[in-house]
Structures are given as structure tokens and as C-alpha cells.
Image (cartoon, grey):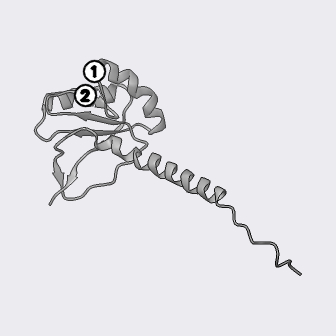
Amino acid sequence: MRDDDQAIHFDFAPMVDIVLLLLIFFFLTSSLGVRQNALPLDLPRASTTVKETPALPIVSVDRSGKVFLNGKETTLTKLKMQLKPLLVTSNGVVGLRADERGNYGAVVKVMDVIKASGGERLALGTRTAQ
């Protein structure tokens, strides 16, 4: 039998710890998707698109011809060395995002650097047609 003199005690400390851990987890995972769209690029439209894979290295070329690797500005000479270790984990696939009104010559130069660093396939970034 139970003593009626003892009150039932519920400890909220473990529940608060779990809620805080869940909040931290969601804050960290929600910010990972932001890095892909950090550059203000006006991507060309396509009738069909495929969702981006976070494991792919993303090379972006803005309207003025500046080159970015995963959202950080780089040069063509540095891009080749920076891409080599990333291509091992992505199986030779590189995401390429370029501004629709950008410098076509800069995009071709970036494609040459991707090929020279071991890139075998390109995943071109587009946005859905409205």
C-alpha cells in the first residue's frame, strides 16, 4: 500500500534539458540550407527542377563574373585546388549556379576549371518557371 502522506513529485529538469537540446538541433539544421541561396543570383527558369543535394560542392558565378565556392568568394586559380578534395566525396559531380544575365565567358572558364580539377558531371542550377 501507498502512504497517503507522501506527495507525488515530478521533476521538470530533464524535460527542460530535452526541449533545449531539440531547439539547438533545429536551429543548427535549419541554417544549413541557407548557404546554397546566400548569393543573390537571378537563375534561369526551367520547366522542371531537381532539389539540391547538400553534399555537392556548389560553384556560383554572379552577374559581374565573380566566382564563389559554397558561398565563399574565390578565384579561378584557387578554385581548382579547392575543388579537388570536394570532388572525391561528391563522385565527380559539381553544382553550377550562374546568373541569367551574367558573363557567359566567365561561366565557360569556370566549367573548364571544374573539368581540369576532376569534375565529371555538372548539375546546373535553375529555378522553376512560373
Residue type marked 1: Thr
Quadrant (top left, top right, bottom left, bottom right) of the N terminus: bottom right
Near mark 2 (Cα within 10 A), the count class, few <14, some 14-19 or many ≥20, is many
Of the pair 127 and 91, the residue shown nearer to us: 127
Q: Residue at x 16, y 58 (%)?
A: 129
Please tell me whether mark 1 sits on a helix, a strand or a loop.
loop
Q: Find the residue positioned furthest to the bottom.
A: 1
Q: Residue at x 46, y 28 (%)?
A: 85
First reached walking from the N terminus: tag 1 or tag 2 = 2
Near mark 1 (Cα within 10 A), the count class, few <14, some 14-19 or many ≥20, is few
Q: In the image, residue 17 lies at what x, y percent? A: 61, 53
Above or below, comparing residue 117 to residue 124 in the picture: above
Q: In the image, residue 46 lies at what x, y percent? A: 18, 54
Q: Which mark is residue 28?
A: none
Give the number of marks. Answer: 2
Q: Find the residue positioned furthest to the right.
A: 1
Q: Find the residue positioned furthest to the front.
A: 5
Which residue lies under the disc numbered 2?
67
Quarter of the view holding residue 110:
top left
Of the pair 89 and 68, the residue shown nearer to us: 68
Q: In the image, residue 73 lies at what x, y percent? A: 29, 26
Which residue lies under the disc numbered 1?
75
Quarter of the view holding residue 11:
bottom right
Residue type marked 2: Val
Q: Pointer 1 and pointer 2: residues touching (CB < 8 Å)?
A: yes
Above or below, comparing residue 27 to residue 80 in the picture: below
> Distance between the Cα atoms at labels 1 and 2?
6 Å
Q: Report whether 114 appears left or right of 47.
A: right
Q: Residue at x 14, y 60 (%)?
A: 130
Please tell me whether mark 2 sits on a helix, a strand or a loop.
strand
Q: Residue at x 69, y 66 (%)?
A: 10
